[in-house]
Image: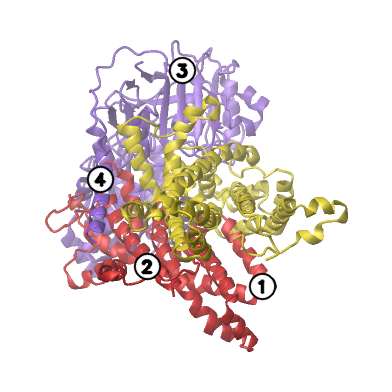
Chain colours: A purple, B red, C yellow
Amino acid sequence: MRTRLQQLIACVGVILVVAACGGGPAGTSAGPAGPPQQGGSLTTLVTSGFAGSWPSGLDPATNTTGGANLSHMNAIFSGLFKLVADDDGGNARVEPELASGYEFEDGGKTVKVSIREGIEFSDGTPFDAEAVAFNWERAVDSSCTCAPRWPLVEEGGITVEGNTVVLKFTQPYAAVINSMVVSNANWIASPTALEKMGEEKFKMKPVGAGPFKVVSNRLSSELRLTRNENYHKQGRPYLDELIIKSVGGDQPAYQAVLAGQAQVFEGMVTTPLIDQAQGNPQVTVTPQPPTSPYVIQLNTKKAPFDEQKAREAIYYATDVEAIRKGLFGNRYPAAQTFTGPGGMFHDDTVPGYRTYDPEKARQLVKELGGLTVHLGTIKQYVAEQINTALQSQWEEVGIKTTIDSHELNSLIGNFNSGEWEAMLQTAGAWDPAAGVGVGFRFDSEAPFSGVADPELDTLLDDAAATIEPQERDELYAEAGKLISDKAYAPFILAFAPTNIAAEGVHGPGVTTKIPPVLVNTGIQWDEVWMSQ
Amino acid sequence: MAIVEASASPALLEEAGQGRFRGWLRHLELIFPGALLVLIIGGCFVWPLVAAVPDPVGGDVLESNLPAFSEGHLLGTDPNGNDVWSRILYGGRASLVVGVAVNVLGLIVGGTLGAVSAHVGGLLDAVIMRVLDVLIAFPSLVLTLAVAQSLGPSQVNTIFALAFFSVPAFARVSRAATLRLREQPFMTAARLSGTSGRRMLFRHIAPNITPQLVTFSMLSMGIIIVIEGALSFLGLGIPPPAPSWGNMISQGQQALSATPMLVVWPCVVLFLTVLAFNLLGETLRARWSGR
Amino acid sequence: MTTTEPVTDDAREAAPGAVARLVHSPSVRLIARRLVAAVPIVLGVSILTFIVLSLIPGDAAQLLLGPEATPEQIAAMHRQMGLDQPPVQRYLGWLGGALTGDLGNSLVSGQPVTGELGSRLAVTGELVGLAFVLSLGLAIPVALLAAYKPNRLFDRVSMLVSITGLAVANYVIALLLVLVFAVQFAFFPAIGFVPIGQGIGENLRSMLLPAVSIAFPLFCFYTRFLRGDLVDQLRGEDYIVTARAKGIGPGQVLLRHAFRNSSFGLLTVVGLNLGTLIGATVIIEQIFALPGIGQLLLQAINTRDFVVVQACVVVFAVVAVLANLVTDLLYAVLDPRIRYGNR
């Protein structure tokens, strides 16, 4: 008996020791970044549940997960436009890249995108307005979710004038350029290569005008890229080889960077690991400036949230400060509207926004005669944690709460059926009009929205159509105020993932901050370099 | 899974009573795992009723990730501020319920299937065995994922999904045991004296194969609890925040290097549980096979 | 597929007289009979997969087209994917293709499944093979040593170790192994697969940690099993008593007699384990970023790419059936007295 116990204790001890030595050896701190160096092979890791999933291939016309596969697509295709920022993530702006500029006419109903002269695809064929128009026509006709939703006129929506492509809309659409950087329309494929290879082969080894060429592509697993000698920028890219690998979780990815099998990990979300990485001099930890806040969507078309009091109770019951501190170590800023500090038209606060007040919440619940809520979210670590915290807080003031997390399939099913009550989601984008922007969550027509308010629709439509930034800002502020006043959806905090880089790796988006257009930052792979 | 299947050979009783010490040791073989099990089951099911244990869910997020032996939190708290000690106890309830339910399902459904199949023989046996062969050759995980995804994750559905692992295994154990039994003289005697098929099954076969099936279930308890954790790893299984040992481990591994204790504690209790069930199972096997 | 049980004999009638002599060769007959018996199993698995997959909610078209797709768009996509045909017709079409080696094209990527599966099979095959070699290679000596002197120190320690292995999930083992052997001491890479073409040494280095993560629980399981069986055999089987009475030493009795007998049971268990092993490869390939079938299977389930899932499952089933065939043959090698089907 005694020996058994001793063995048992010894055994437990072994587990503890093994688990405890996970700290990793202390390394030397990163030296100052010298002048960029040429060469080297870099492996970047992406999480298998999100950016590391590209099941439908990498053809811009059919890649349904393009918004997540920014690294893949930007490395192969570069982009007509790109989102750049100062090193601290400030002063973010869209700049022409393979395009040379754009012009609005007709008060935003026509946009002319001029194409940079003398650029070639990596197969040597010319990158010109014809090629861009070909791609856009193909994209618009595609049945893919990734097809651009431009309000094009029936006839002659896309035309070519010299080296300029002209888009004609039925209504003013000023956000077209800003939303281009989150859209597959930003990536232009070589028409010649497409024709030669056929669609099925092309989606495996697409040809673009980006800094890298595809060597091999194993879907949702590994993409090997090599330097495009034909790249239009002199002396770029710095890297000889870029490998994008899908890995199943933050912990294995972090370990792989520490062990030297990868140099970059895009999109770490687990707070304790980020804390640990920040204490580790072997890696550079770059939290990206958040643009998209978490929001609790409330289904106002259905009980209990067709009643404003019930919605207000949720506002008052939600202690955002506690969630910020307890779950995320004050890492992400609180949000009161659909923008984050990294995005455009951001306001820290909204006048009259209802903040945490348990007494008022209790009072409202009492007046309602009790409140029972089913809160859902997508299966994802951070979202599930927030939901768990929300459940505790709401229960605390007497709101009976059940929570549950969905696969994408069942999430879509829930929204389609309209049977949902509350959903924790992310809203907004760098430009609120772009991609999964604010309209996606708040427009009466949108399938993922729980709000049906014509006033809000008008505000959001006007804001997307307006060119003048000052005016847009005002319209969005008004929309934010309306959402807050009517208690449509409480916002939690603006979240953005963190990028991890091994010592000696430098580059925009990797070791500097660029606001994520949607969820993840578009790393500029042509500028990334590593010391040898 | 077929621990017992090929090994339950008749064995002679070991010469008992080589002094008092041996006798004690024989008792200890039963008492130690038995006491450990009583401790674990009592801890999970009774202790929260009699002692002041915090809630396993609904913790204060401001008290997240406290270390062990913090005030009011014996084993600290998890990232949501839930008390880990309490989650171990309540999680044990879920895990033990799943383990027992899956094994009971396996025992009853699989056990009956195997025994009937062997007893009746002929075409029925061939059909049942082919179906089981299909189930065994079929990657169980796909079946489990399918069940869990079509029914949604919950404790009951987890039990059903895991039953796909246990039923074929139990059926094989039970069939092999019944086949062996058929060759025993008393079975032949019963057959010759015209005992009805049903009576044979209930009076002669069932009591004789039950010990084997029970020991087998002891050994597979731990495996089932661990597999429940693997389902959690893939986003299925018992949905958090409700705790189970399996989902505590799979949640904890997401930041294993930063907060290892969140994985260590459930692993330790799981280890003790598997130890107890294994020791008990082996002791019972030794005793029953010696009978 | 416990091999001591009689096998329904479909092969006997099927054998025509002209090849009678060849057919009468026991090993050929055995292989033929087992192969024939395997056909309905593989067919059954493929039908079962088809049924199971139709029960999973959601479909690839909806996922590809997104939430805003109209029912007409989804119907059009279904036509394009061939999902609009009745299930029986779809199954027969698939079966026809599968028999000629064409497992169809992925619903999501449109790529042919057969080629993709082939290259991934090599990775998973190596992983599982290595895991078997490691687990059996260690379990047999450990179990023998433990059974040689039951209830002594070595036996007790081996029991505690193997119970640890049964209680700790393989993904925890994997992460701990990487923390120690890849991060702390850079002996092995933390992730990634090096094809065998780039050097067998590097290849093995990249596969060792994942293989150990799968092998450790297996090793524990086999050790528990074999040790228990050996002790049972030694305790009282008649032939052991006879052997002892003839004055054969305890080591000889253990190796020559008890182990030889116990190896049958072990073989059976090894064969049966294969199905459950798939679960382990799914998880371990995720953690180590290995481009194997488990990774493909999980992705395909998540995207509802049922053509790929179907192919993966059938490949697994074929491997499981083949593995059982091999165990049967090994049985025959170990003990020529076993006459199959004539019990």
What residue is pinned by disc 4? Answer: B259
Q: Nearer the viewer, mark 3 or mark 2?
A: 2
Tell me if I can see residue A430 in this picture: no
Q: Residue at x 52, y 40 (%)?
A: A64
**CA neighbours of label 4 inside 10 A, class few (<14), some (14 to 19), many (20+):** many
Looking at the picture, do discs 3 and 1 lie on one chain? no
Q: CA distance from mark 3 to mark 2?
A: 63 Å
Q: CA distance from mark 3 to mark 1?
A: 65 Å
Q: Residue at x 45, y 66 (%)?
A: B216
In the image, taking residue C215 as reference, residue B39 lies left or right, namely: left
Q: Nearer the viewer, mark 1 or mark 2?
A: 2
Nearer the observer, A157 or C1: C1
What residue is pinned by disc 3? Answer: A240
Q: Position of residue C178 (x, y in %)?
A: 36, 37
Q: Residue at x 28, y 40 (%)?
A: A273
Judging from the image, mark 1 belongs to the subunit labelled B
**CA neighbours of label 2 inside 10 A, class few (<14), some (14 to 19), many (20+):** some
In the picture as drawn, the residue positioned furthest to the right comes out as C18
Numbered tag placed on residue B124 in the rendering:
1
Q: Secondary structure at mark 1?
A: helix
Tell me if I can see residue A42 in this picture: yes
Q: As displayed, is residue C103 above or below residue A254? A: below
Badge 1 or badge 4: first in the primary sequence:
1
Badge 1 or badge 2: first in the primary sequence:
1
Numbered tag placed on residue B283 in the rendering:
2
In the image, taking residue A224 as reference, residue A36 lies left or right, namely: left
